[in-house]
Amino acid sequence: MKDVSVITVFVASPGDVTVERDEVVSVVNDLNISLCPQLGLRLEVLRWEENVVPDFDEYPQAAINKQIGDEYDIFVGILANRLGSKTKVAESGTLEEFGRAYARYQSDNDSVRLLIYFNEELVNQYSLDLDQVEKIRTFRHSLGEKGGLYRTYSGSDDFKTKFRQHLTSIVAGIHKRLSENPIDAKHSEAQNLAQTPKTAVEPTTKLEEIMKLAEEEMPSHDGINLIADGELGAHDYLDIYVVEFANLTDLIQGLSDLITNFGVQISKRTLAFEDVNKIQDARLMVSAKRRNLLLLARLFDSYCEISAESIRSIERARIEAFGSLEKAVTLILGESDEMKEEFSEFPAQLESYGESADEARIGIQGLRNTADQLVLQSSLIEPSRKRLVKALGELIAELEAHKTSSRDMKGTIEALLSDY
Protein backbone atom coordinates (compact mmCIF):
# COMPACT_ATOMS: atom_id res chain seq x y z
CA MET A 1 0.00 0.00 0.00
CA LYS A 2 1.33 3.40 -0.94
CA ASP A 3 2.46 5.57 1.97
CA VAL A 4 0.26 8.58 2.61
CA SER A 5 1.56 11.73 4.28
CA VAL A 6 -1.03 13.75 6.21
CA ILE A 7 -1.01 17.54 6.06
CA THR A 8 -3.07 19.20 8.79
CA VAL A 9 -4.72 22.59 8.23
CA PHE A 10 -5.82 24.57 11.29
CA VAL A 11 -8.45 27.29 10.78
CA ALA A 12 -8.41 30.25 13.19
CA SER A 13 -11.00 33.01 13.04
CA PRO A 14 -13.72 34.81 14.98
CA GLY A 15 -17.37 34.00 14.40
CA ASP A 16 -18.18 36.44 11.58
CA VAL A 17 -16.49 34.39 8.84
CA THR A 18 -18.30 31.06 9.18
CA VAL A 19 -18.85 30.83 5.42
CA GLU A 20 -15.12 31.17 4.76
CA ARG A 21 -14.38 28.51 7.40
CA ASP A 22 -16.70 26.14 5.55
CA GLU A 23 -15.02 27.04 2.25
CA VAL A 24 -11.70 25.85 3.71
CA VAL A 25 -13.29 22.45 4.31
CA SER A 26 -14.78 22.46 0.81
CA VAL A 27 -11.43 23.22 -0.83
CA VAL A 28 -9.67 20.56 1.23
CA ASN A 29 -12.29 17.94 0.32
CA ASP A 30 -11.96 18.82 -3.37
CA LEU A 31 -8.15 18.56 -3.32
CA ASN A 32 -8.34 15.26 -1.42
CA ILE A 33 -10.28 13.89 -4.38
CA SER A 34 -8.61 15.58 -7.34
CA LEU A 35 -4.95 16.20 -6.46
CA CYS A 36 -3.73 14.64 -3.23
CA PRO A 37 -4.19 10.93 -4.11
CA GLN A 38 -1.80 11.34 -7.04
CA LEU A 39 0.81 12.85 -4.74
CA GLY A 40 0.49 10.40 -1.87
CA LEU A 41 -0.91 13.11 0.42
CA ARG A 42 -4.06 13.69 2.43
CA LEU A 43 -5.28 16.99 3.87
CA GLU A 44 -7.07 17.15 7.22
CA VAL A 45 -8.80 20.22 8.67
CA LEU A 46 -8.65 21.13 12.35
CA ARG A 47 -11.52 23.35 13.58
CA TRP A 48 -12.87 23.88 17.06
CA GLU A 49 -16.37 23.08 15.78
CA GLU A 50 -15.37 19.53 14.92
CA ASN A 51 -12.20 18.80 16.89
CA VAL A 52 -12.92 20.26 20.32
CA VAL A 53 -15.18 18.69 22.96
CA PRO A 54 -16.55 20.38 26.12
CA ASP A 55 -13.81 20.75 28.72
CA PHE A 56 -12.43 22.93 31.53
CA ASP A 57 -9.08 24.67 31.82
CA GLU A 58 -7.58 27.88 33.15
CA TYR A 59 -9.76 29.77 30.63
CA PRO A 60 -11.87 28.67 27.61
CA GLN A 61 -9.23 29.33 24.95
CA ALA A 62 -6.70 27.27 26.92
CA ALA A 63 -9.06 24.28 26.63
CA ILE A 64 -9.17 24.78 22.86
CA ASN A 65 -5.37 25.12 22.65
CA LYS A 66 -4.88 21.90 24.60
CA GLN A 67 -7.14 19.88 22.33
CA ILE A 68 -6.03 21.38 19.01
CA GLY A 69 -2.35 21.26 19.90
CA ASP A 70 0.46 22.88 17.94
CA GLU A 71 1.49 20.13 15.55
CA TYR A 72 -0.51 21.22 12.49
CA ASP A 73 1.31 22.03 9.24
CA ILE A 74 -0.67 25.01 7.93
CA PHE A 75 -2.23 27.85 9.94
CA VAL A 76 -5.11 29.66 8.18
CA GLY A 77 -6.19 32.91 9.86
CA ILE A 78 -9.30 34.68 8.51
CA LEU A 79 -10.53 38.10 9.64
CA ALA A 80 -13.28 40.42 8.45
CA ASN A 81 -14.88 42.98 10.78
CA ARG A 82 -14.47 41.37 14.20
CA LEU A 83 -11.37 40.28 16.08
CA GLY A 84 -13.22 38.23 18.68
CA SER A 85 -13.39 38.10 22.47
CA LYS A 86 -10.36 38.91 24.61
CA THR A 87 -8.55 36.07 26.38
CA LYS A 88 -6.18 36.10 29.36
CA VAL A 89 -3.12 36.42 27.12
CA ALA A 90 -4.28 38.09 23.90
CA GLU A 91 -6.78 40.52 22.38
CA SER A 92 -8.78 37.56 21.08
CA GLY A 93 -8.75 33.79 20.75
CA THR A 94 -7.76 34.12 17.09
CA LEU A 95 -4.77 36.32 17.98
CA GLU A 96 -3.74 33.92 20.73
CA GLU A 97 -3.82 31.06 18.22
CA PHE A 98 -1.80 33.11 15.75
CA GLY A 99 0.71 33.96 18.47
CA ARG A 100 1.29 30.28 19.20
CA ALA A 101 1.71 29.49 15.50
CA TYR A 102 4.04 32.44 14.97
CA ALA A 103 6.18 31.35 17.94
CA ARG A 104 6.60 27.96 16.23
CA TYR A 105 7.52 29.71 12.98
CA GLN A 106 10.14 31.82 14.75
CA SER A 107 11.81 28.76 16.25
CA ASP A 108 11.71 26.85 12.96
CA ASN A 109 10.64 28.52 9.71
CA ASP A 110 9.84 25.15 8.16
CA SER A 111 7.62 23.95 11.00
CA VAL A 112 4.42 25.71 9.90
CA ARG A 113 3.03 27.78 7.02
CA LEU A 114 1.10 30.91 8.02
CA LEU A 115 -1.71 32.05 5.72
CA ILE A 116 -3.54 35.21 6.82
CA TYR A 117 -6.57 36.63 4.99
CA PHE A 118 -8.57 39.85 5.47
CA ASN A 119 -12.02 40.40 3.98
CA GLU A 120 -12.27 43.74 2.13
CA GLU A 121 -15.92 43.39 1.14
CA LEU A 122 -17.86 46.55 1.96
CA VAL A 123 -20.44 46.20 4.72
CA ASN A 124 -23.12 48.39 6.28
CA GLN A 125 -21.08 50.98 8.17
CA TYR A 126 -23.65 51.12 10.98
CA SER A 127 -23.06 47.44 11.77
CA LEU A 128 -19.36 47.98 12.50
CA ASP A 129 -17.87 47.90 15.97
CA LEU A 130 -15.25 50.66 15.81
CA ASP A 131 -13.11 49.15 18.54
CA GLN A 132 -13.04 45.77 16.78
CA VAL A 133 -12.20 47.30 13.40
CA GLU A 134 -9.37 49.35 14.88
CA LYS A 135 -7.90 46.27 16.57
CA ILE A 136 -7.95 44.42 13.26
CA ARG A 137 -6.12 47.30 11.59
CA THR A 138 -3.50 47.26 14.35
CA PHE A 139 -2.97 43.52 13.94
CA ARG A 140 -2.85 43.85 10.16
CA HIS A 141 -0.13 46.49 10.33
CA SER A 142 1.85 44.43 12.83
CA LEU A 143 2.19 41.60 10.32
CA GLY A 144 4.45 43.70 8.13
CA GLU A 145 6.77 44.33 11.06
CA LYS A 146 6.99 40.56 11.54
CA GLY A 147 7.92 40.05 7.89
CA GLY A 148 4.47 38.70 7.05
CA LEU A 149 2.64 38.93 3.72
CA TYR A 150 -1.13 38.67 4.04
CA ARG A 151 -3.78 38.56 1.33
CA THR A 152 -7.11 40.34 1.03
CA TYR A 153 -10.30 39.04 -0.53
CA SER A 154 -13.75 40.38 -1.35
CA GLY A 155 -16.43 38.00 -0.17
CA SER A 156 -16.50 34.25 0.38
CA ASP A 157 -16.36 33.29 -3.32
CA ASP A 158 -13.19 35.32 -3.83
CA PHE A 159 -11.72 33.77 -0.68
CA LYS A 160 -12.42 30.25 -1.94
CA THR A 161 -10.75 30.97 -5.28
CA LYS A 162 -7.62 32.46 -3.71
CA PHE A 163 -7.36 29.89 -0.94
CA ARG A 164 -7.63 27.04 -3.45
CA GLN A 165 -4.76 28.53 -5.46
CA HIS A 166 -2.60 29.04 -2.40
CA LEU A 167 -3.29 25.63 -0.86
CA THR A 168 -2.67 23.88 -4.18
CA SER A 169 0.68 25.62 -4.47
CA ILE A 170 1.64 24.68 -0.91
CA VAL A 171 0.62 21.06 -1.42
CA ALA A 172 2.74 20.87 -4.56
CA GLY A 173 5.68 22.34 -2.65
CA ILE A 174 5.29 19.87 0.20
CA HIS A 175 5.12 16.99 -2.28
CA LYS A 176 8.32 18.18 -3.94
CA ARG A 177 10.10 18.49 -0.58
CA LEU A 178 8.99 15.05 0.58
CA SER A 179 9.98 13.55 -2.77
CA GLU A 180 13.46 15.01 -2.53
CA ASN A 181 13.78 14.17 1.17
CA PRO A 182 11.57 11.17 2.02
CA ILE A 183 12.88 11.10 5.60
CA ASP A 184 11.09 14.45 6.17
CA ALA A 185 7.70 12.82 5.73
CA LYS A 186 7.06 12.97 9.46
CA HIS A 187 3.35 12.25 9.12
CA SER A 188 3.72 9.22 6.87
CA GLU A 189 1.50 6.36 8.05
CA ALA A 190 4.30 3.92 7.18
CA GLN A 191 7.16 5.94 8.66
CA ASN A 192 8.04 3.29 11.24
CA LEU A 193 8.67 0.80 8.43
CA ALA A 194 11.45 2.89 6.89
CA GLN A 195 14.83 1.65 8.03
CA THR A 196 17.18 3.82 5.97
CA PRO A 197 16.65 7.19 4.28
CA LYS A 198 16.76 7.33 0.51
CA THR A 199 19.04 9.79 -1.21
CA ALA A 200 16.80 10.16 -4.25
CA VAL A 201 13.34 9.18 -5.44
CA GLU A 202 13.39 6.96 -8.48
CA PRO A 203 10.55 7.27 -11.02
CA THR A 204 7.87 4.67 -10.28
CA THR A 205 6.20 4.75 -13.69
CA LYS A 206 7.30 5.20 -17.29
CA LEU A 207 5.38 8.48 -17.40
CA GLU A 208 7.27 9.82 -14.36
CA GLU A 209 10.54 8.71 -15.93
CA ILE A 210 9.72 10.55 -19.15
CA MET A 211 8.61 13.67 -17.26
CA LYS A 212 11.78 13.65 -15.20
CA LEU A 213 13.89 13.36 -18.36
CA ALA A 214 11.92 16.16 -20.02
CA GLU A 215 12.49 18.44 -17.04
CA GLU A 216 16.22 17.75 -17.14
CA GLU A 217 16.57 18.36 -20.87
CA MET A 218 14.14 21.20 -21.41
CA PRO A 219 14.20 24.04 -18.87
CA SER A 220 11.25 26.36 -19.26
CA HIS A 221 10.37 30.00 -18.95
CA ASP A 222 6.72 30.40 -17.98
CA GLY A 223 5.72 27.44 -20.10
CA ILE A 224 8.14 28.13 -22.99
CA ASN A 225 10.68 25.35 -23.49
CA LEU A 226 14.19 26.67 -23.91
CA ILE A 227 17.61 25.24 -24.49
CA ALA A 228 20.25 25.13 -21.76
CA ASP A 229 21.24 28.27 -19.86
CA GLY A 230 23.90 30.25 -21.69
CA GLU A 231 22.85 28.85 -25.07
CA LEU A 232 19.65 30.77 -25.69
CA GLY A 233 19.11 31.73 -29.31
CA ALA A 234 17.62 34.88 -30.72
CA HIS A 235 14.22 33.28 -31.25
CA ASP A 236 14.23 31.97 -27.66
CA TYR A 237 14.69 35.54 -26.47
CA LEU A 238 11.92 36.67 -28.80
CA ASP A 239 9.61 34.03 -27.30
CA ILE A 240 10.36 35.33 -23.81
CA TYR A 241 9.73 38.88 -24.99
CA VAL A 242 6.36 37.94 -26.51
CA VAL A 243 5.19 36.30 -23.27
CA GLU A 244 6.43 39.05 -20.96
CA PHE A 245 5.19 41.80 -23.24
CA ALA A 246 1.72 40.23 -23.12
CA ASN A 247 2.05 40.12 -19.32
CA LEU A 248 2.99 43.80 -19.30
CA THR A 249 -0.02 44.68 -21.44
CA ASP A 250 -2.35 42.84 -19.06
CA LEU A 251 -0.75 44.48 -16.02
CA ILE A 252 -1.12 47.96 -17.51
CA GLN A 253 -4.77 47.23 -18.27
CA GLY A 254 -5.15 46.09 -14.69
CA LEU A 255 -3.81 49.44 -13.50
CA SER A 256 -6.43 51.20 -15.64
CA ASP A 257 -9.13 49.12 -13.98
CA LEU A 258 -7.59 49.96 -10.60
CA ILE A 259 -7.85 53.68 -11.30
CA THR A 260 -11.50 53.40 -12.35
CA ASN A 261 -12.43 51.32 -9.33
CA PHE A 262 -10.67 53.66 -6.92
CA GLY A 263 -12.64 56.59 -8.31
CA VAL A 264 -15.90 54.71 -7.79
CA GLN A 265 -15.00 53.80 -4.21
CA ILE A 266 -13.94 57.35 -3.35
CA SER A 267 -17.23 58.66 -4.76
CA LYS A 268 -19.15 56.23 -2.55
CA ARG A 269 -17.24 57.34 0.53
CA THR A 270 -17.79 61.02 -0.38
CA LEU A 271 -21.54 60.48 -0.65
CA ALA A 272 -21.47 58.64 2.67
CA PHE A 273 -19.75 61.61 4.34
CA GLU A 274 -22.41 63.92 2.90
CA ASP A 275 -25.10 61.71 4.43
CA VAL A 276 -23.29 61.78 7.77
CA ASN A 277 -23.35 65.58 7.80
CA LYS A 278 -27.15 65.46 7.59
CA ILE A 279 -27.49 63.55 10.86
CA GLN A 280 -29.05 65.79 13.50
CA ASP A 281 -27.87 64.00 16.64
CA ALA A 282 -24.25 65.09 17.24
CA ARG A 283 -23.30 61.83 18.94
CA LEU A 284 -24.66 59.69 16.11
CA MET A 285 -22.96 61.95 13.58
CA VAL A 286 -19.55 61.49 15.25
CA SER A 287 -20.02 57.73 15.41
CA ALA A 288 -21.04 57.54 11.74
CA LYS A 289 -18.12 59.77 10.73
CA ARG A 290 -15.63 57.53 12.49
CA ARG A 291 -17.11 54.47 10.79
CA ASN A 292 -16.65 56.14 7.43
CA LEU A 293 -13.06 57.04 8.25
CA LEU A 294 -12.31 53.43 9.17
CA LEU A 295 -13.83 52.18 5.93
CA LEU A 296 -11.80 54.72 3.98
CA ALA A 297 -8.65 53.64 5.85
CA ARG A 298 -9.36 50.02 4.90
CA LEU A 299 -9.80 51.12 1.30
CA PHE A 300 -6.43 52.90 1.36
CA ASP A 301 -4.72 49.88 2.95
CA SER A 302 -6.11 47.63 0.26
CA TYR A 303 -4.96 49.86 -2.60
CA CYS A 304 -1.57 50.26 -0.95
CA GLU A 305 -1.16 46.48 -1.01
CA ILE A 306 -2.31 46.26 -4.63
CA SER A 307 0.12 49.02 -5.60
CA ALA A 308 3.04 47.19 -3.96
CA GLU A 309 2.14 43.95 -5.76
CA SER A 310 1.83 45.82 -9.07
CA ILE A 311 5.29 47.31 -8.71
CA ARG A 312 6.88 43.90 -8.17
CA SER A 313 5.01 42.34 -11.09
CA ILE A 314 5.54 45.01 -13.73
CA GLU A 315 9.17 45.60 -12.76
CA ARG A 316 9.97 41.92 -13.23
CA ALA A 317 8.05 41.74 -16.52
CA ARG A 318 9.72 44.95 -17.78
CA ILE A 319 13.22 43.65 -17.08
CA GLU A 320 12.47 40.29 -18.70
CA ALA A 321 10.69 41.73 -21.74
CA PHE A 322 13.04 44.54 -22.69
CA GLY A 323 16.16 42.63 -21.68
CA SER A 324 15.15 39.69 -23.90
CA LEU A 325 14.24 41.93 -26.83
CA GLU A 326 17.57 43.72 -26.60
CA LYS A 327 19.44 40.40 -26.67
CA ALA A 328 17.37 39.20 -29.64
CA VAL A 329 18.09 42.40 -31.54
CA THR A 330 21.81 42.03 -30.92
CA LEU A 331 21.84 38.42 -32.11
CA ILE A 332 19.62 38.74 -35.19
CA LEU A 333 19.85 42.11 -36.85
CA GLY A 334 23.54 41.82 -37.50
CA GLU A 335 23.16 38.53 -39.34
CA SER A 336 20.20 38.52 -41.71
CA ASP A 337 18.38 41.09 -43.80
CA GLU A 338 15.40 38.74 -43.74
CA MET A 339 14.76 39.70 -40.11
CA LYS A 340 14.31 43.37 -40.98
CA GLU A 341 10.63 42.94 -41.85
CA GLU A 342 9.97 40.97 -38.66
CA PHE A 343 11.55 43.64 -36.46
CA SER A 344 9.97 46.49 -38.37
CA GLU A 345 6.74 45.97 -36.39
CA PHE A 346 8.39 46.45 -33.00
CA PRO A 347 8.90 50.25 -33.02
CA ALA A 348 5.17 50.89 -33.47
CA GLN A 349 4.36 48.27 -30.84
CA LEU A 350 6.79 49.82 -28.36
CA GLU A 351 5.48 53.30 -29.04
CA SER A 352 1.92 52.16 -28.40
CA TYR A 353 2.95 50.43 -25.18
CA GLY A 354 4.88 53.50 -24.03
CA GLU A 355 1.76 55.60 -24.55
CA SER A 356 -0.35 53.12 -22.57
CA ALA A 357 2.17 53.09 -19.73
CA ASP A 358 2.19 56.89 -19.69
CA GLU A 359 -1.60 57.01 -19.63
CA ALA A 360 -1.55 54.67 -16.65
CA ARG A 361 1.10 56.85 -15.00
CA ILE A 362 -1.07 59.94 -15.47
CA GLY A 363 -4.06 58.10 -14.01
CA ILE A 364 -2.06 56.87 -11.01
CA GLN A 365 -0.73 60.41 -10.55
CA GLY A 366 -4.32 61.68 -10.39
CA LEU A 367 -5.16 58.96 -7.87
CA ARG A 368 -2.13 59.96 -5.82
CA ASN A 369 -3.13 63.64 -5.96
CA THR A 370 -6.60 62.75 -4.70
CA ALA A 371 -5.17 60.81 -1.75
CA ASP A 372 -2.56 63.49 -1.10
CA GLN A 373 -5.14 66.27 -0.93
CA LEU A 374 -7.56 64.27 1.21
CA VAL A 375 -6.12 65.44 4.52
CA LEU A 376 -8.74 64.61 7.16
CA GLN A 377 -6.58 65.16 10.24
CA SER A 378 -7.64 61.94 11.92
CA SER A 379 -5.48 59.22 13.43
CA LEU A 380 -7.97 56.70 12.05
CA ILE A 381 -6.94 57.39 8.47
CA GLU A 382 -3.75 59.48 8.25
CA PRO A 383 -1.25 56.57 8.56
CA SER A 384 -3.07 54.66 5.83
CA ARG A 385 -3.35 57.70 3.60
CA LYS A 386 0.36 58.49 3.90
CA ARG A 387 1.32 54.90 3.11
CA LEU A 388 -0.89 54.96 0.03
CA VAL A 389 0.61 58.24 -1.21
CA LYS A 390 4.11 56.80 -0.83
CA ALA A 391 3.22 53.51 -2.55
CA LEU A 392 1.59 55.28 -5.47
CA GLY A 393 4.64 57.50 -5.84
CA GLU A 394 6.82 54.39 -6.19
CA LEU A 395 4.41 52.97 -8.77
CA ILE A 396 4.56 56.21 -10.75
CA ALA A 397 8.37 56.02 -10.79
CA GLU A 398 8.20 52.45 -12.13
CA LEU A 399 5.78 53.50 -14.89
CA GLU A 400 8.14 56.30 -15.87
CA ALA A 401 10.86 53.65 -16.23
CA HIS A 402 8.55 51.74 -18.56
CA LYS A 403 8.06 54.79 -20.76
CA THR A 404 11.81 55.36 -20.87
CA SER A 405 12.56 51.70 -21.67
CA SER A 406 10.00 51.71 -24.49
CA ARG A 407 11.39 54.90 -25.98
CA ASP A 408 15.02 53.77 -25.76
CA MET A 409 14.32 50.30 -27.20
CA LYS A 410 12.29 51.83 -30.03
CA GLY A 411 15.18 54.15 -30.87
CA THR A 412 17.69 51.28 -30.79
CA ILE A 413 15.67 49.13 -33.19
CA GLU A 414 15.00 52.04 -35.55
CA ALA A 415 18.70 52.88 -35.64
CA LEU A 416 19.68 49.27 -36.37
CA LEU A 417 16.98 48.90 -39.03
CA SER A 418 18.18 52.03 -40.79
CA ASP A 419 21.57 50.35 -41.33
CA TYR A 420 20.07 47.52 -43.39
Image (spheres, helix red, strand yellow):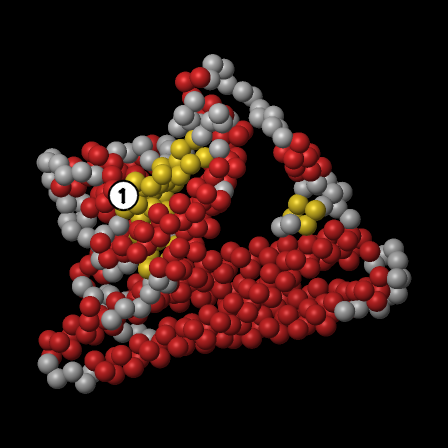
Across and down, in percent, residue 272 comes to 27, 79
* Residue at 43% over, 22% down: 190
Across and down, in percent, residue 214 comes to 69, 38
Q: Is residue 127 above or below residue 220?
A: below
Across and down, in percent, residue 134 comes to 22, 60
Residue at the far front in the pictured view:
1
Q: Is residue 69 above or below residue 290?
A: above
* Residue at 45% over, 59% down: 308
Which of the 4 image quadrants contains residue 304? Answer: bottom left
Q: Is residue 170 visible?
A: no
Q: Nearer the viewer, residue 12 or 256?
A: 12
* Residue at 26% over, 50% down: 13
* Residue at which label 1 appears: 47
Q: Is residue 416 left or right of residue 182?
A: right
Question: Amino acid under label 1?
Answer: Arg
Q: Nearer the viewer, residue 309 or 62?
A: 62
* Residue at 74% over, 67% down: 346
Image quarter (top left, top right, bottom left or bottom right) of the C terminus? bottom right
Q: Secondary structure at mark 1?
A: loop
Across and down, in percent, residue 259 comes to 46, 73
